[in-house]
Image (cartoon, rainbow, N blue to C red):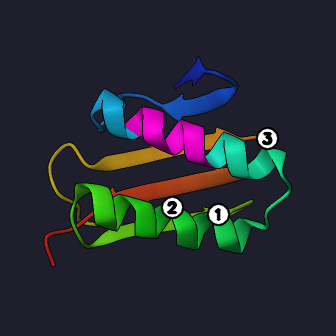
Amino acid sequence: EYKIINNFEFMIPIEMPEDIVNDIIFHVSTREQIKVGHAEIVEELRKLLDEKYGKYWHVFCGKNFGAYSVHDRNRFLFFKYKSMSYLIYKTSY
């Protein structure tokens, strides 16, 4: 099940604080508007999250992928934006 916020389709429940989700929405939508490549968006977003919210963030983007992860509590997000899916989570190590 998904919840749509600003054209982003978030898998619910959203397991991320609202301020972090807002930073992610802003970064992805802004970089998409100026046609930055997805690899650059992912790398910039990871660096932004590492600097602002502590190290060990993992950011993935693609059209078709599966994943299994162990993540910190309340630090997991999966969403779709335009034709791409994003998986973002933080670990302690």
Nearer the observer, 27 or 92 = 27
* Mark 3 and mark 2 residues within 8 Å of each other at the beta carbon: no
18 vs 23, left or right, is left
9 relative to 3, above or below? below
* Mark 1 and mark 3 residues within 8 Å of each other at the beta carbon: no
Task: Tell me which residue sits at (64%, 22%) in the image.
Answer: 6
> Which residue does the numbered mark 3 point to in the structure image?
82
The residues bearing labels 1 and 3 have C-alpha atoms spaced at a distance of: 14 Å
- Please name which of the two marks, 1 or 3, marks the residue nearer to the observer: 1
Q: Which mark is residue 41?
A: 1
7 relative to 89, above or below? above
Where in the figure is residue 18, as x and y percent of width and height? 33, 28
4 relative to 51, above or below? above
Q: Give whichever of discs 1 and 3 has the lower sequence position.
A: 1
Of the residues shown, which amino acid type is indicated by label 2? Leu
Task: Tell me which residue sits at (79%, 41%) in the image.
Answer: 82
Q: Quadrant of the C terminus?
A: bottom left
* Mark 1 and mark 2 residues within 8 Å of each other at the beta carbon: yes
Circle 1 SS class: helix
39 magenta-colored: no
The residues bearing labels 3 and 2 have C-alpha atoms spaced at a distance of: 17 Å
73 vs 42, left or right, is left
Mark count: 3
Of the residues shown, which amino acid type is indicated by label 1? Ile
Range shown magenta: 21-27
